[in-house]
Amino acid sequence: MSLQVPVRDRMRGLRGESQADILRRTGQFGVLPTDTDEQAVGKLNAVAAASAALAESAAGPTYPDTGAGLAATTDGQAFAVDNGDGTVTIYLNDGGVAVAQRTLFTTAYAASPDGAAAIGSDDDTGGVKWSNLAQALQYIQPGGANAMRWGVVGDGSTDNTDNLNDAIEALYQEFGGGTLYLPLGDIRIEGPILWRTGVNIKGIASQRPGGSDITRIVTDSSDIFQHGYGAYLGGEMSNLELLSEIGGGHLFKTSVGQSRSHIHHVNLYQRNPDKSILSAVHGATDGYYGNWWSNFNAEYAVENEVPAFHVECGNTINQNVFREFRIGRPAISKSGTYAFDFHSTAATIASGLNLVDQATFQQPGGGAVRMRGLRESRVRQSGVWDLTSGSLNPLFYFGINVNGLRTQRSGLDQVYCSFNGADPTTTDVFVEADGTGNIFIDYSQIGKLAGNDPTNVGAGVSNRGSQINTVQDIAVTEYDARYGYTRRQAAAMIQTFQQAVGYPMSNDGFMRWLINNAYVGGMDSTGRFLWGGTPSSPGMRIGTDGTIFAKEFRQLTSQAKISWGTGAPNGVVEGYIGSIYFNLSGGAGTTMYVKESGNPSNTGWVAK
């Protein structure tokens, strides 16, 4: 019995018969030229199983060897012997001699993926094309292709560079894109892979629930994925790992031009200290934009000397969207600069970052996030845990570009920072603005573990001012005078500022500093707001040294407050014993009142 498989296969250049030809030849077998691998194999399996069942029925019972078959049959009867490889041989009892007639599939084997792999199809030259349909049955979905068709293997040693590039190019050239499924194992490459427009790259590990195998691309000699100029305008990557070993290159490297991608559910490992996970460094007028990285894990070697994620785009307006980052232990950056370094970009969103550091922030260039020359860019809804003392750099740094670009409308939003730094010269958050900053640090908690030096926020550099700088709703466990808001700034505001232990906040040349709803504890000789100039002793000063305008200024340790208004406070102003009220209407003996009874109430005010 002979089976032919007239299935069109454009990926292999095969041509099948028309539906009419198939029906005329078989009367019922309807494999269509447009059938997918699953559909075609399903029909083949059905016919093969039926044929095998018919043959087995005609051959009679199956015996372990010819001796057993001859003993159980008489002259002229047939019997089958199991060959142990998914086939049986049919024998004829010819006067006590077993005469082989033919070898057939068993029903179970023909219906299995491995058995289906042995079914061939005629090609254009009259030969037979054999394909591993078992892999197709397990891993291929409509609209996709298995990289194994181009010889990609996950044996950990074979160089797959050309084969993998051929697979991506085939999908791009013939179909304008599609999903390329990579096999299990370590897919080693010795040259970069060009990621083409519209091609999605997906590992198959997620389709094996409970399995320990993974799909991983490994290199020790080159970059892994590259995006050429204007060549990459959309694609998705998921369900695999990328590993750059010592000697390897960047995991992702883009040249000039546009680049859009969505990378998610991947594990990224960089072991080469001189290379980044992402390197997108362009010239003064080139862009890199529209990129979305979400729900992934990354690990960076402790000794790395370059940023883990480095995006630098000259002076163009770009759109780099990074969201839902999750960076796990042991570390993500020794980083010659920072774990994330966004330089001269716009509309950069780093959202949901979880940065856990055990050793690397303490290196000379280490830190969490650095943004320079940015516009409309934020780090939001994120957390940073620095678990090792001795950091030498700010965890967050906002600065100007060396090209002179202004950092505008950028900052931290809903960020939690737990810092274990023991180096007293460290600034946890540093803002270096230059005239048109609009730097915002909103709804953030910046704290240190118990027993360590104060958390501090530094701003400005000599002869550079920043306008409309806001720090609002920020909780700080301790505040260090040495790195308070220093240097010249205009229209700066600190709103709802909570300070648990008092350290002076210093100023040098501020114009209009508004502190609203400030809660400060430990108001001793070192726990005051310090206004620069002379005299140098701490205190709240007026006159040439500057003026502090405070509304309902109070301490954490007491409800007593200082307030003011027009007219006497009795029956109008509620307060606690010890509060002071100033009557702006003036008058002998009626200008200042002290609350001496009634706690709290609007009575008990006594004029002084």
Image: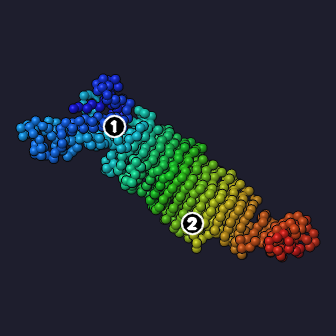
Quadrant of the rendering where the N terminus is positioned:
top left
Quadrant of the rendering where the C terminus is positioned:
bottom right
Q: Nearer the viewer, residue 226 or 476?
A: 476
Q: Nearer the viewer, residue 240 or 194?
A: 240
Q: Dot 2 lies on which element? A: strand
- Distance (Cα) linking label 2 and label 1: 60 Å
Mark 2 or 1, closer to the camera: 1
**Lateral position of residue 268 relative to residue 437, left or right:** left
Q: Residues within 10 Å of mark 1 (few under 14, many from 20)?
A: some
Numbered circle sitting on residue 262:
none
Q: Residues within 10 Å of mark 2 (few under 14, many from 20)?
A: many
Mark 1 sits on what residue? 42
At 64% from the left edge and 69% from the top edge, which residue is drawn? 478
Instruction: From the top left corner, tell me how far across and down residue 437 is, in percent.
Output: 67, 53
Q: Is residue 436 visible?
A: yes
Instruction: From the top left corner, tell me how far across and down residue 172 is, in percent.
Output: 43, 36
Q: Nearer the viewer, residue 66 or 608?
A: 66
**Lateral position of residue 289 relative to residue 516, left or right:** left
Q: Quarter-wise, where is residue 132 in the image?
A: top left
First of labels 2, 1 by sequence position: 1
User: Do callouts 2 and 1 mark residues in contact (Cβ within 8 Å)?
Assistant: no
Q: Amino acid at mark 1?
A: Gly
Instruction: From the top left corner, tell me how far across and down residue 215 is, in percent.
Output: 38, 50
Numbered circle sitting on residue 419:
2
At 36% from the left edge and 29% from the top edge, which residue is drawn? 33
Q: Residue furthest left?
A: 95
Q: Residue furthest right?
A: 588
Q: Is 245 above or below relative to 606?
A: above
